Image: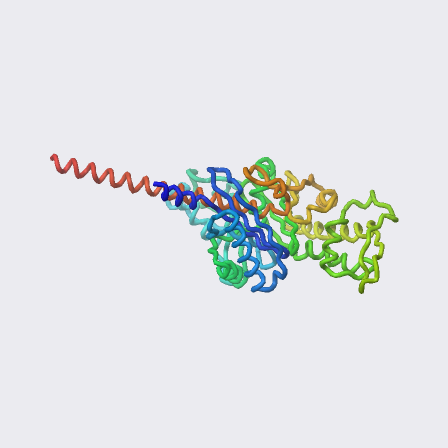
Amino acid sequence: MDDNKQDKRKDEYIFGLDIGESKINLFVGVSEGENVRVVECGDFPLKNADEFDSVVETLQQAVQVIENTTRVDVHDVYVGIAGKHVRSLDTQGIVTLPMGEVREEDIDNVTKQASTLPASAGEIIHIFPGEYNLDDEPHIRNPKGRSGRRLGVDVQVVTVKQNALQNLAKCVNRAGLNVAGFVLEPLAAASAVLTNDERELGVALVDIGAGTADIAVFVNESVRFTFSYEYAGNSITSDISRCLNVPIALSKAEEIKKKFGTCVISNLIEDDTFPVPAVGNRGDVSCSRKLLAEIITARVGEIFCKLNEQLKVHQLDSIINGGIVLTGGCCALEGIEDVACKVFGKPVRVGRPKGMSGIQEAYQNPSYATGIGLLYYANKQHREKKNRETGTQIAVSMKKGFQRVLEIIRTYL
């Protein structure tokens, strides 16, 4: 009896893995119905994200530390994915309705048709049906049960280059883990930071990490658009390293960005300085904090402009009535939401993980939105799987019961 309870308890654990450019986050949670209780959040610096062995080694260390801390075996993980190898495609499908009425199988068929892509498009990780059209009637959210002749749908398909997906899976497997599923990182982050009101009105989530700046547009439960820009936090660090009046290493530039960086220029004066070690142990050199803020703000503004251009090209800026929500490590920069507000011309807020029990205050931070969001996503998948299994068990039990009744009837007839 106790063993069964223990096994069931193990099944309730869920795991999220976020492999970024500068760190690996490994999260452990427990499914509690619609809620998730955070058991542990691991934050592990990554020396070289481009080196396969370095990532595997760091991930193995992360697993060992988490397992020792929680005494739980980390196994099936939901893995966040983003970057230049991710593509978002708009596709359409249309089918005839043989019964003259929209059935569940018709909805499945039109979605399948819309998401049938050539192999060159990459591996599909998400399919997001948008609005349906029935004959001449557009903008239908749920067409099931309606009468008509032809059913169409607009679909957003997210794909990943096959070799990128294979390499990421291989990395996770080498560390002794199984991939339960790949999740688009902005989708995961949205699970942790967006409100229902924002989704209903239409909202853009902007996730600025170290390697990429990713944007996703949400309307209700549908993802309308995603885009990844390859300039983000590391680009800001690189600008600081190049543009200050004293040459400094990237590691030092990153430290300066975190300690003295700001996007608020108006409050700074010319003689507001900070010390920077000169090359070759030649003492400290004073650098202008206003210059630092100008360097940072210029790059941040450029990143937001690039993302805003994409919204306008795809005519999405008009449906984002819920504004912009910022997540990611760069949100630690003071005043970044003000820069975003000027560029996008929309209300902007910084998104922090919400609504989870057991989470430490330190992890209610935009930089952990993706990792915490992966637990939300994993929990949803976990519950849907259990519901399907329960439904199957009920169906089997009913069938057996019916057969038993027939046997009894035959026996007494």
Across and down, in percent, residue 252 comes to: 74, 57
Relative to residue 59, is residue 225 depicted above or below? above
- Whether residue 19 is visible here, answered yes or no, is yes
Q: Residue at x 60, y 56 (%)?
A: 83
Q: How is the image coloured?
A: rainbow
Numbered circles on residues, count:
0
Q: Quick check: 198 left or right of 181?
A: right
Question: Toward the viewer: 101 or 282?
Answer: 282
Q: Quick check: 316 left or right of 141?
A: right
Q: Residue at x 80, y 52 (%)?
A: 292
Q: Residue furthest right?
A: 271
Q: Residue at x 74, y 52 (%)?
A: 257
The answer to which image quadrant residue 46 occupies is bottom right
Q: Quick check: 59 left or right of 401?
A: right
Q: Quick check: 260 left or right of 96?
A: right
Across and down, in percent, residue 131 comes to: 52, 43
Question: Toward the viewer: 285 or 223?
Answer: 285
Question: Toward the viewer: 264 or 46?
Answer: 46
For the N terminus, give its image quadrant. top left
For the C terminus, give its image quadrant. top left
The answer to which image quadrant residue 349 occupies is top right
Relative to residue 124, is residue 146 depicted above or below? above
Across and down, in percent, residue 372 comes to: 56, 45
Across and down, in percent, residue 272 comes to: 85, 48
- Whether residue 223 is visible here, answered yes or no, is no
Q: Residue furthest left?
A: 413
